[in-house]
Amino acid sequence: MSRVAQAQSPILWTDPQVIPYLDPNTETPFLLADSNGGIHAFSSQKVPGTYEYVVVYNYWSRETGWSKPVDVLLSPLFDEAHAPAAYLDHKGIIHLVFYGGHDVSANIYYSQVYATEAANADAWTPPVAIATGARPPITVWIDGDADDNLYVLFGGNPEGTGIYATESRDGGDSWTLPELVSATYSETLWPYGLRMHYGESGRLYATWIVLNRRAWGTTLYVSTYDFDARRWNDPVEVDYGVETGILGVQSPSMIEYDGELFLMYDNGLPDQGVVRLIRRSSDGGRTWTEAIRPFPEHVGGNGPAAFVVDSNHDLRVFFGQRTNAIVKDQVHGMWYSEWHSGTKSWGGVKYIVSGPLVQDSDGDKGFDPSLARSAVSQGNLLMIVWRTDPGNGANGAWYSYTELEAPFYALQPLPTPEPVVHKTVTITATLGLTKTAEEELAALGVTPLAALPTIDETHQPPEVRQLANPA
């Protein structure tokens, strides 16, 4: 892949490489960084020769690189597990949700595992349906707060098409019934592009768009969670698709930084094409600045951007696009820019990798970086992953990383599950129980069979919310 001299990066990045062993058609993996210098990756992959999709896990560290992927979760419904999203809590437990099912019938499933055992499929708890009525286009997310309460949002149609919420305050053991956050009031408008973010102020945010039947983004929304009322606030309409533009609003992402909420997204503007815009809010997402186009030399809809804050408290954003030029001179790449707090502006655009567009739908040479995702390990290692735009070829997920001149957080071993201690009690008894033997058994908490109460066959258990997988 060729590089462009005028956009040379001052940061030394590793040569981009494909994440080994992943399916060429995989989406960009979902990343989680832990306190022990590792990065956990989750993706959905098709099982060759079947209609099954499984959640696949692999792990990266400085010392070992990428591990071989392991199939860890299969959907109980139609054997299709899509769009995994995960949260790592302060106890070292990974909480994961995914869309399980197909276009007609699907649920949101939840599972958990200690991060130290994530590569062991048997260590994951069996997936349970925490919400029914999920529907495409597939969109689901999970996040947690400072107390490790868990929050899940998803798009579905349990009681009308819209965004629904469920939450858990006991580490995923039980979940609230899904509640409607925002309705589209139409069978031809669907929520998509969900992102959640627990900000440095302790606020919990969510953003999404609404698509019409042409996959054109009509409206961009942001909502905040009310911790006192334990509900999501009515969403704010931040922007709209321009009728004469291309694709409408698409691909939102956000981060809270130095008291402001940054919201970046695409919008198709007449005579400009699909451009990347950004707005800021200083009041928790209630009001917003006017949209600006921070990178006027770049165009194209290549998926959401990825915001990163390192241990120097420097903010960067990573995104896939192409330079704005005639086709033969266009340069595609995975780009980034740094925020300058003093001037409240974005710096020049640099690249991790760049080159001409390569369309290779039948092979593995396609080049058009899109859908950036990121993780920060130990404060100073930035890991960026992406995929080639699916319209230009399937050649897997790619990655590159850099180690910044920034404070290095010391490694902290991850918690491990406590071993189960099985107590052994030795009981000596004769064939005919004596009073002394009965007393000895009672002292051990054992009731002789003759003393067990009879069973009331008419008894019915109380009604409880069923977390087992629905049929």
Image (cartoon, helix red, strand yellow):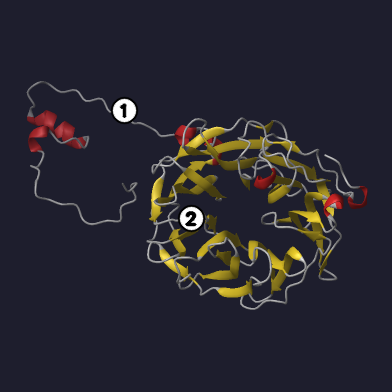
Per the rendering, the mark at residue 468 is none
Pointers 2 and 1 in contact (CB under 8 A)? no
Name the side, left or right, on which 4 lies relative to 443: right
What's under tag 1, amino acid-wise?
Thr
In-image side of 91 versus 311 (left or right): left
The amino acid marked with disc number 2 is Pro
Q: Is residue 92 visible?
A: yes
| In the image: residue 115, left or right of residue 295 | left
Is 398 placed left or right of 284 in the picture?
right
Residue 16 x %, y %: 77, 39
State which quadrant residue 313 falls in. bottom right
Q: Out of 56 and 432, give the one closest to the viewer.
A: 56
Can residue 173 be seen from the camera position used here?
A: no
- The numbered disc on residue 424 is 1
Report x, y in % for residue 416: 53, 38
Residue toward you, 263 or 310: 263
Q: Locate residue 150, reporting x and y percent.
A: 49, 57
Give the vertical position of 162 relative to 425 (above or below).
below
Callout 1 secondary element: loop
Residue shown at the point (11%, 33%) measured from the top left: 449
Q: Earlier in the sequence, mark 2 or mark 1?
A: 2
* Residue under the point 67% across and 56% down: 304
- What is the number of the mark on residue 136? 2
